[in-house]
Image (tube, coloured by chain):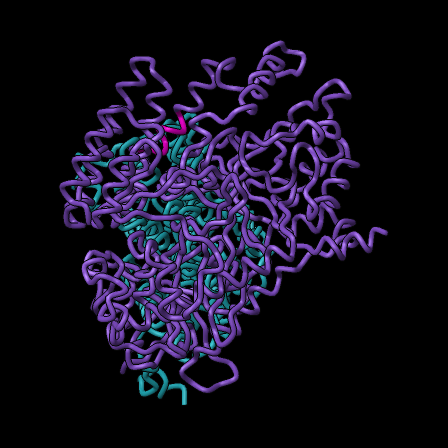
């Protein structure tokens, strides 16, 4: 595993991943034969992660099928260990509950696991087909005292900040919602079922692809919404706009005169090491100087309630369609709450997106042609590409549908070529144009960058915008905000130690126990060191690596992610959540009201990825003062 | 406006679905014929290879046209791109591309069909289960086609599906005639005394009609008895039978009417129509004449395909040439 953290050219790295994935795949078989099913499952999933990293589709498929079959086999062989106890009368049911409560009393090192760990896990595109669903069909607890109504009072977060309750009492913003949900009693479980039915009927899916069984899966959803007060949200929203404004000025500066470097705010070598800096974009001036038009920033909340930006996604952030669909579901399921509470709407996003994109059109026309560029049906976010194209009335195109002629972009239709004005690309910029970036790209459009450079087509997000979401750049964002805007950041950045600075490095080496260390130029979560979980040998190894190549490492303190009450197997339990709001930067900035709340459905897990047992919740931004007036 | 990529994938999905269905019916009917006739009739398995145009490819891998090899090759051999299994797989790949345009249950049907056909491929070869297997393929293809017809808008996307299906069908009908009827005509040439003298003459003609699902409709429209010219006329020129070449071309033209820039493909379609209209079936006396006719029809269908590809599937900055000779003919 350590190998994967090593720095080497991309081509070699891909081969390395492929080879390691293949080895892991074999190791999985050996483990399985030896009867070590847990190990086998883990190794297969690791193989899968490696395979996906390299786009090694045959290996992906094999590993996926293995991981899947293994899960089935193990479940068939070991029903008692693999599944939950079937009946609440089962003694194990009770003893398990006791264990849970004991766990909740204190924070285990694993729970205090770092935010970076969450990022490791979320960053790794593991697609585990085994999905611990909320088990809607499981029998409701037998005695009245264990019904959902009573559970609200007993609910305790395991030493983390809880988004909705403190010591079993609702927070101010959540009080209306909690009161209502409490009054539902076990009816809440019926509402969860209704929500799942609605999701099926509405065809809200995400896709886990293997050629053997190309089916969509229903989107895992928790019916209990996550509530944020308007007052708090306005502050967060201001902070996000401020952040994006600075980041856009930074990108524009970087590809322009790079004053930020000449003024000594950003060391030139940070830029030189950045995997997402695209020298080919230098000198381009996109309309309004805006590069990152659409951003999805991941927010987490630490135990003391502070909200941090964990990362900014400036390339192809996804998830917004699920935010919109989640709202449609809760509107069906909790129709009465929408009457009583002042819940801010989210549905205007596709319109705002369309307006923002249309404004980028190089041709002054009332109906610019907009195309959503997707890598194709195999992409896990394809549902969203289809969704957004439909909502905006845009073409849904792949690279092969576009043609550049005389530096103009056309889409091939049965009526002939149609000129394209704006491309909302959901393809990573390295694959956009084989003439400029990766020449082996099958999903790109030759000549696209030429057309963009001369201003004949607008691309959102602009190629090269990803430079501002590098891990190394992340550390500088507070400084960038001060430099470009002369303001203090309104929303916190996780403190980040840069190992190439002597003072920082000394601190990091002295506090390895508490910190998370990661390679600055690595994505996908590989090569990350988690202090609280590391052995002394691991520590020695990472210390040596930092000393050898300090520039390649950053370190951050551990955070504990906040929790929110979640319905799992008919019980209301705390589960870790994060939040991804979406920010549009056009003539005027727009921030979604709330965003996509992702929840780790497995206890203590920080995995919020939908393909790995993560689910989502609707996010309600509401003004509690208005709600309390209405409720009398 | 429909993207070229979607248009092309729908067209091919239509063709492959039709190919899977037709090949399944060919195998089914030929198996039944084989069981019916005594060995002395000399009906072998090579006509099936001839119809599908895969004689050479088959002989490259097998010693001779043994029953199990031929059926396996045509039904489930993944290396034979014209096999039923490969056709289903291709239909599915193409439907996946244009999935956003289709009613979602149709995707489930084609995925199920593909999964089932791959899992049960041995049943296709075993004589005891073969007919059942072929029937399943045929009825699942019908299910899918019916589902699309019943739930999809009759729009440009549907037009491409239909054009693909009808061209494939017309092509298949000409191939069946070329091979099977060729055998019969050669027998007649050897026995100039009369049709009744050829052993099993009517059984074989019935089998030709059956393999195109035509014998019942033929009976209803022509009456009792089967004669070569009647059958030929029915399969080539009948305006009402949905598998006649005439009907397929008329359907394709109707679909073309719904499309933009369809003048050139319409002209190509009309050209094949003319060949058919000018034909008197009783003039066809030798296998060579029949072969010539099928060649001409297949060439016409090939031209039409090229024109469609040029007009709709290729992404080129040039508008379609309007100085094409076929266009001049029209004006």
As displayed, is residue A393 above or below residue A528?
below
The front one of A253 and A65 is A253
Left or right, B27 with respect to B162, comes to left
- Furthest residue toward right: A632
Whether residue B139 is visible, yes or no, is: no
In this rendering, position of residue A184 left or right of residue B287? right
Q: Is residue A230 visible?
A: yes
Q: Which chain is purple?
A: A
Residue beneath the point at 42% across and 85% down:
A363
Q: Position of residue B219 (x, y in %)?
A: 55, 50
Which residues are drawn in magenta?
A62-69
Quadrant of the rendered structure where residue A16 is? top left
**Residue A47: image x %, image y %?**
29, 33
Q: Main secondary structure of the magenta part?
A: helix
| Residue B230 shown in magenta | no
For residue B78, side relative to residue B149 (left or right):
left
Which residue is at a point 41% across and 36% down the rendered structure image?
A: B117
Q: Position of residue A627 (x, y in %)?
A: 77, 53
Q: Quadrant of residue A411?
A: bottom left
Q: Nearer the viewer, residue A487 or A536?
A: A487
Front residue of this view, candidates A419 and B23 = A419
Query: On screen, A446 above or below B131?
Result: below
Image quadrant where one finds the C terminus of chain B: bottom left
Q: Is A67 within the magenta?
A: yes
- Spot the residue most to the top: A91
Q: Colour of chain B?
A: cyan
């Amino acid at each position: 595993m350590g190998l994967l953290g090593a720095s080497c050219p991309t081509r070699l790295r891909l081969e390395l991943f492929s080879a390691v994935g293949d080895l892991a795949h074999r190791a999985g078989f050996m483990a399985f034969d030896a009867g070590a099913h847990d190990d086998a499952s883990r190794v297969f999933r690791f193989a899968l992660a490696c395979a996906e990293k390299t786009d090694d589709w045959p290996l992906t498929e094999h590993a996926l099928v293995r991981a899947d079959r293994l899960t089935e086999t193990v479940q068939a062989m070991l029903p008692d260990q693999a599944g939950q106890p079937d009946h609440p009368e089962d003694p194990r049911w009770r003893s398990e509950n006791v264990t849970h409560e004991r766990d909740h009393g204190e924070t285990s090192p694993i729970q205090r696991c770092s935010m970076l760990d969450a990022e490791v896990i979320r960053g790794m595109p593991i697609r585990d087909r085994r999905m611990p669903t909320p088990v809607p069909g499981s029998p409701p607890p037998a005695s009245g005292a264990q019904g959902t109504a009573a559970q609200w009072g007993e609910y305790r977060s395991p030493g983390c900040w809880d988004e909705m309750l403190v010591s079993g009492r609702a927070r101010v913003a959540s009080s209306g919602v909690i009161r209502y949900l409490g009054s539902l009693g076990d009816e809440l479980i019926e509402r969860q079922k209704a929500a799942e039915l609605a999701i099926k009927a509405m065809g809200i899916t995400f896709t886990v692809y293997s050629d053997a069984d190309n089916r969509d899966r229903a989107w895992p959803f928790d019916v209990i919404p996550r509530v944020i007060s308007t007052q708090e949200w306005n502050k967060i929203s201001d902070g996000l706009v401020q952040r994006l404004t600075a980041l856009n000025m930074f990108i524009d500066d970087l590809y322009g005169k790079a004053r930020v470097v000449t003024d000594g705010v950003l060391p030139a070598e940070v830029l030189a090491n950045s995997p997402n800096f695209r020298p080919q974009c230098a000198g381009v001036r996109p309309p309004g100087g805006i590069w990152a038009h659409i951003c999805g920033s991941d927010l987490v909340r630490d135990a003391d309630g502070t909200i941090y930006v964990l990362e900014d996604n400036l390339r192809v952030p996804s998830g917004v369609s699920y935010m919109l669909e989640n709202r449609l579901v809760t509107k069906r399921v909790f129709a009465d709450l929408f009457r009583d509470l002042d819940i801010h709407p989210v549905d205007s996003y596709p319109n705002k997106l369309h307006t923002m994109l249309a404004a980028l059109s190089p041709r002054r026309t009332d109906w610019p042609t907009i195309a959503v560029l997707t890598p194709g049906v195999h992409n896990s976010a394809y549902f969203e590409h289809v969704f957004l194209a439909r909502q905006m009335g845009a073409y849904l195109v792949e690279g092969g549908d576009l043609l550049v002629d005389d530096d103009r972009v056309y889409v091939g239709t049965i009526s002939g070529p149609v000129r394209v004005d704006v491309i909302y690309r959901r393809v990573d910029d390295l694959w956009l144009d084989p003439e400029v970036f990766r020449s082996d790209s099958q999903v790109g459009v030759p000549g696209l960058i030429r057309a963009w450079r001369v201003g004949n087509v607008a691309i959102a997000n602009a190629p090269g915008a990803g430079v501002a979401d590098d891990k190394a750049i992340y550390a500088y964002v507070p400084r960038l905000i001060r430099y470009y805007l002369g303001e203090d950041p309104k929303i916190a950045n996780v403190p980040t130690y840069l190992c190439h600075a002597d003072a920082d490095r000394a601190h990091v080496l002295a506090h390895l126990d508490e910190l998370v260390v990661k390679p600055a130029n690595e994505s996908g979560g590989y090569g990350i060191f988690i202090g609280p979980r590391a052995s002394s040998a691991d520590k020695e190894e990472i210390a040596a690596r930092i000393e050898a190549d300090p520039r390649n490492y950053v370190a951050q303190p551990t955070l504990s992610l906040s929790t929110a009450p979640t319905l799992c197997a008919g019980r209301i339990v705390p589960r870790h959540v994060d939040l991804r709001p979406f920010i549009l930067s056009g003539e005027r900035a727009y921030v979604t009201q709330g965003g996509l709340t992702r929840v780790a459905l497995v206890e203590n897990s920080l995995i919020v990825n939908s393909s790995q047992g993560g689910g989502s919740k609707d996010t309600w931004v509401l003004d509690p003062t208005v709600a309390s007036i209405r409720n009398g | 406006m429909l993207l070229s990529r979607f248009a092309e994938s729908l067209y091919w999905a239509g063709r492959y679905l039709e190919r899977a269905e037709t090949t399944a019916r060919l195998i089914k009917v030929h198996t039944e014929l084989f069981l019916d006739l005594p060995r002395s009739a000399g009906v072998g398995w090579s006509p099936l290879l001839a119809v599908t145009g895969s004689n050479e490819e088959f002989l490259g891998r097998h010693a001779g046209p043994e029953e199990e090899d031929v059926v396996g090759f045509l039904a489930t051999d993944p290396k034979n791109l014209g096999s039923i299994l490969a056709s289903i797989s291709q239909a599915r790949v193409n439907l996946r591309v244009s999935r956003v345009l289709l009613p979602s249950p149709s995707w489930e049907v084609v995925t199920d069909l593909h999964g089932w056909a791959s899992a049960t491929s041995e049943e296709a070869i075993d004589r005891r289960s073969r007919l059942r297997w072929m029937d399943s393929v045929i009825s699942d293809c019908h299910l899918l086609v019916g589902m699309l017809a019943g739930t999809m808008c009759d729009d440009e996307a549907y037009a491409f599906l239909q054009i693909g299906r009808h061209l494939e069908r017309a092509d298949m009908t000409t191939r069946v005639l070329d091979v099977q009827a060729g055998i019969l005509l050669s027998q007649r040439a050897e026995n100039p005394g009369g049709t009744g003298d050829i052993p099993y003459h009517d059984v074989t003609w019935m089998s030709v009609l059956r393999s195109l699902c035509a014998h019942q409709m033929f009976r209803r429209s022509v009456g009792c008895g089967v004669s070569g010219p009647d059958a030929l006329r029915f399969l080539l020129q009948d305006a009402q039978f949905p598998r006649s070449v005439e009907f397929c071309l008329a359907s394709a033209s109707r679909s073309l009417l719904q499309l933009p820039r369809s003048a050139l493909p319409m002209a190509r379609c009309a050209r094949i129509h003319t060949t058919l209209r000018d034909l008197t079936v009783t003039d066809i006396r030798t296998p060579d004449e029949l072969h010539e006719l099928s060649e001409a029809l297949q060439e016409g269908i090939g031209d039409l395909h090229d024109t469609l590809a040029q007009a709709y599937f290729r992404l080129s900055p040039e508008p379609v040439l309007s100085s094409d000779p076929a266009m001049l003919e029209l004006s």
